[in-house]
Amino acid sequence: MRSAFNRRRFMGTTAAASLGTLAIGASAPKPVGDKRPIVIASGNGLRAVEKAMDLVHKGSDPLDAAIEGVAIVEADPNDHSVGLGGLPNEEGVVELDAAVMHGPTHGGGSVASIRNIVHPAAVARVVMQRTRHCLLVGEGALKFARAHGFPEVNLLTDEARQIWLHWKETHDSNDDWLPAPKETVAAFIRETLAHRITGTIHCSALDTHGDLGCTTTTSGLAFKIPGRVGDSPILGAGLYLDNEVGSAGSTGLGEANLLNLASYLVVEGMRRGLHPKDAIMETCKRIATTSVRDPGRRRSDGKTSFGVSFYAVNKKGEYAGGSIYPGGSMAVHDGETARVIGCDALYDK
């Protein structure tokens, strides 16, 4: 049974921590420009685009706006794919990955396999600003975060622990773990384990000066091998931008994006003059072509056995979402209203 008391406690604690955490590395607002702003995100990012656009309208840097937008999801214990409440690795430990890119400086930073930090995207920004590196991992990333004032929090909520424990008890019938009686297994556990969670949130912001910022943040593949790193913290794979061209990010099976530097391909497509939709579809075709060379990544019909989705916006403010298979969605705020729209799909099934 879910505990409302625990949720209030978690939300209260993390909300207080977030206020100070998100200020670390943030720039002072500047006068608002005269260009039309756009904020896009993956389908779970409606609250993110609303928050980010509010900050863009107040003159915030586009990267700062995107980071504060995704921070809402990072701090939500009921979202099991990002931050607090994210599903753990196979040993029951939550490991987070995140990356950022900043259009005006073409800077980037990321963290991978970081533990006990609610807002890894904000840590990635400080990696970009306060080091000569692009990527910090594991214990080194955590020490760096602590040194810059990020508080440590136990990211494994009771609900996520129950989901992990049931997975642990049932995924191998030959081990010594015994599952709880079926009638005692909560519905939310069964619902969550019906499909392996690969969720992530990406957010790209185009501000009123025509500058771009983006971030991708995730708790990664549920029950992964400890230390597994997907595409989210890898510049060019889980996200990429060029301030003269556009910005793109992705969710789905990270390994496919790593093997194809997929977000970079989307931006390069836009550089060649393709509309974001066409750049995304071209990249989906590339992944569909290369991935099925591996028998373990193709279905019996010859198509990929996994899904990947992309979200892109160009310098002109044109945007699109696309995926290999139907069912994907993206959140968008055009400066006036926020809404969730469907993604175009490469295949119909």
Image (cartoon, helix red, strand yellow):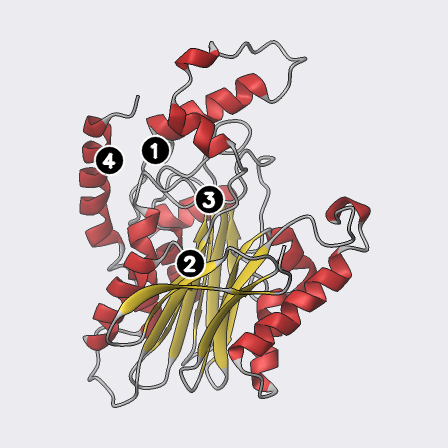
Mark 4 or 2, closer to the camera: 4
Give SS at disc 1: loop
Q: Which mark is residue 124?
A: 2
Task: Please tell me which residue lies in front, 287 or 95.
Answer: 287
Residue 146's place in the image compared with 160, above or below, is: below
Badge 1: residue crowd in 10 Å (few <14, some 14–19, many ≥20): some
Tell me the CA gap for discs 3 and 4.
17 Å
Location of mark 4 (residue): 10
Mark 1 or 3, closer to the camera: 3
Residue 222: x percent and y percent? 52, 37
Location of mark 1 (residue): 154
Residue positioned 65% across, 73% down in the render: 282
Q: Quadrant of the C terminus?
A: bottom right
Residue positioned 22% across, 40% down in the render: 11
Q: Tell me which label, 1 or 3, sits earlier in the chain.
A: 1
Location of mark 3 (residue): 219
Residue positioned 74% across, 56% down in the render: 291
60 horizontally vs 90: left or right: left
Q: Which mark is residue 73?
A: none
Residue 70: x percent and y percent? 34, 57
Marks 2 and 3 close (CB-CB < 8 Å): no
Marks 4 and 2 close (CB-CB < 8 Å): no
Tell me the CA gap for discs 4 and 2.
23 Å
Mark 1 or 4, closer to the camera: 4
Type of amino acid at the residue the image marks with label 1 = Asn
